[in-house]
Image (cartoon, grey):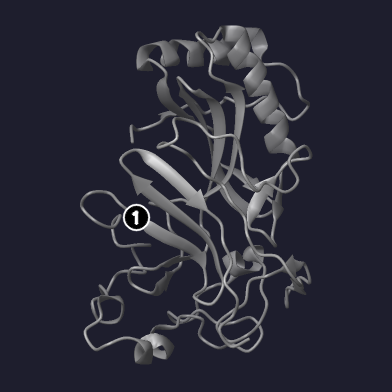
């Protein structure tokens, strides 16, 4: 995927004032012209309900869309069956919205209008801790969004997990995420857990939430997920980005309750948000 253009002052002010004289829209229009309808413009980093996120404006011949990547979230890499403190290389997509569908040509006024709508959405956005997605007032429960690209180049944002909802043991917010030691934690509280002597303590029972030892009996000796860990893996926040071809397979939070996954494949991003019931229940 091409490196995104970073625009540091792309959002409207908090008072909702219009972007002055369409200056930012003009920048995007020029950038779009150079890229021929295949470009990414990154917004400044923001915080939504305590979750660090990076919005990114994407333009293709099929439409103009906003996607939001989550940063510093608890993740789980299925290929190695280990949890990681924070992933900066691969960021799961937690929100996507298409503002304009396919058109022959976009004008400066189009971009200015979209930027104003994006600014409003970002100011009003909240995080659904039960379903693991961001939402706005006009999109309270995003299950399936309009897709950007052809049928083979879709960005799917799905959300599963119905049934009874429990309270987070720490903040009492609704959640469906369960720690390996059996306690309920919302995503925000997972993010706020601090390391203690390279152990990740459960805020309730202080059990180590890293499950390498507890999972070892499930896999044969020599399994890559348990034996081939680098000494400085956690210090580096990951394994350098996965395979040489750039493919990644990440999932958010814990082994027993999987919340999200991101896949990178030939410049195509696919996202699913899913839940699995606790195996002990």
Q: Quadrant of the N terminus?
A: top left
Secondary structure of the residue carrying tag 1 is loop
Q: Which residue is mark 1?
A: 248
Quadrant for residue 173, please give it: bottom right
Image x and y of residue 202, in percent: 59, 82
**As displayed, is residue 107 above or below residue 143?**
above
Q: 70 or 79: nearer the eye?
A: 79
Image x and y of residue 73, in percent: 53, 60
**Mark 1 surroundings: few (<14), some (14-19) or many (≥20) residues within 10 A:** many
Image x and y of residue 2, in percent: 33, 32
Q: 191 or 34: nearer the eye?
A: 34
Q: Is residue 40 left or right of residue 182?
A: left
Q: Quadrant of the C terminus?
A: bottom right
**As displayed, is residue 196 above or below residue 41?**
below
Q: Residue at x 51, y 81 (%)?
A: 209
Q: Residue at x 30, y 62 (%)?
A: 239
Q: Residue at x 64, y 81 (%)?
A: 203
User: Given the current orientation, which residue lies at the most extreme bottom position?
Assistant: 217
**As displayed, is residue 242 above or below residue 166?**
above
Q: Is residue 81 left or right of residue 242?
A: right
Image x and y of residue 96, in percent: 58, 39
């Amino acid at each position: 995927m091409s490196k995104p253009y970073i625009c540091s002052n792309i959002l409207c002010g908090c008072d909702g004032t219009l972007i002055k004289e369409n200056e930012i829209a003009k920048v995007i229009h020029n950038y779009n012209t150079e890229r021929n309808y295949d470009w990414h413009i990154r917004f400044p980093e923001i915080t939504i309900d305590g979750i660090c996120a990076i919005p990114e404006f994407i333009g293709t011949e099929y439409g103009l869309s906003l996607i939001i990547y989550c940063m510093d979230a608890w993740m789980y890499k299925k290929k190695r069956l280990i949890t990681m403190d924070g992933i900066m290389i691969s960021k799961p997509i937690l929100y996507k919205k298409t503002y304009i569908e396919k058109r022959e040509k976009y004008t400066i006024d189009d971009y200015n209008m979209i930027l104003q709508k994006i600014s409003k959405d970002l100011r009003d956005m909240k995080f659904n801790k039960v379903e693991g997605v961001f939402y706005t007032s006009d999109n309270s429960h995003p299950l399936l969004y309009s897709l950007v690209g052809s049928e083979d180049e879709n960005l799917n944002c799905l959300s599963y997990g119905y049934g009874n909802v429990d309270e987070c043991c720490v903040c009492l917010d609704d959640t469906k995420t369960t720690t390996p030691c059996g306690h309920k934690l919302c995503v925000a509280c997972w993010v706020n857990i601090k390391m203690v002597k390279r152990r990740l303590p459960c805020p309730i029972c202080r059990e180590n939430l890293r499950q390498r030892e507890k999972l070892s009996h499930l896999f044969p000796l020599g399994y890559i997920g348990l034996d081939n860990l680098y000494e400085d893996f956690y210090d580096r926040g990951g394994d350098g980005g996965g395979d040489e071809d750039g493919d990644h397979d990440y999932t958010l939070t814990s082994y027993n309750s999987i919340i999200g996954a991101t896949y990178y494949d030939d410049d195509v991003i696919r996202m699913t948000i899913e839940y699995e019931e606790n195996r002990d229940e």
